[in-house]
Image (cartoon, rainbow, N blue to C red):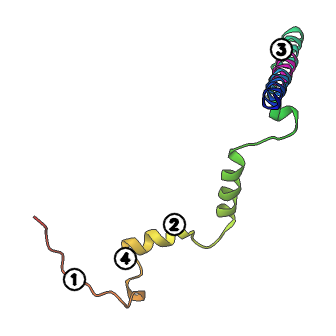
Amino acid sequence: MLNFVLRVFLFLMGLLFAASLAVAALLLLAVWMARLAWARLTGRPVTPWSVMFGQRFDPRAGFERFRSAAARQDAPSAADVASARARGANDKDVTDVRARPVTGRE
């Protein structure tokens, strides 16, 4: 008998939890629809939730930061140095590699 009462109690608690989630979702939907209706009524665009709460994210900001930092430098960038080494601009600095003749693979 106690097992049956426990199952009924847990079932009712699950129903209560599901109902509370449904009420929360409906409340969120009602707030969202009220914002949409107000925006259409006033002729303004609907702003996203993240902008409304101050969490602004601009993906261009990171690129601009590094681009401006690279423009401020007087020395060549790491990409420039790697490109110059790949072209063989600084052959006299390399001491641990022996030059070999190029042979065609067929």
Residue shown at the point (44%, 68%) measured from the top left? 83
Q: Depth-wise, is mark 2 or mark 3 nearer the camera?
A: 3
- From the top left corner, tell me how far across and down residue 2 is, in percent: 83, 31
Measure the alpha-carbon separation of dots 1 and 4: 14 Å
Q: Are marks 3 and 1 in contact (CB under 8 Å)?
A: no
At label 4, the amino acid type is Gly
* Boundaries of the magenta span: 21-30
Image location of residue 49, percent across then percent down: 82, 30
- For label 1, the residue is 100
Residue extending farthest to the bottom is 95
Toward which corner of the image does residue 106 lie, by quadrant? bottom left
* Vertical placement of residue 32 versus 94, above or below: above
Kindly report the distance in space between the C-alpha atoms of the residues bearing marks 2 and 4.
Answer: 14 Å
Q: Which residue is mark 3?
A: 33
| Residue farthest toward the left in the current orientation of the protein | 106
Secondary structure under the numbered disc 4 in the rendered image: loop
- Whether residue 29 is in magenta: the answer is yes
C-alpha separation, residue under disc 2 versus residue under disc 3: 51 Å
The image quarter containing residue 96 is bottom left
Q: Is residue 94 left or right of residue 64?
A: left
Residue 59 in picture, x, y percent from top left: 69, 44
The mark that comes first in sequence, 4 or 3, is 3
Question: Disc 4 marks which residue?
Answer: 88
Q: Residue at x 42, y 81 (%)?
A: 90
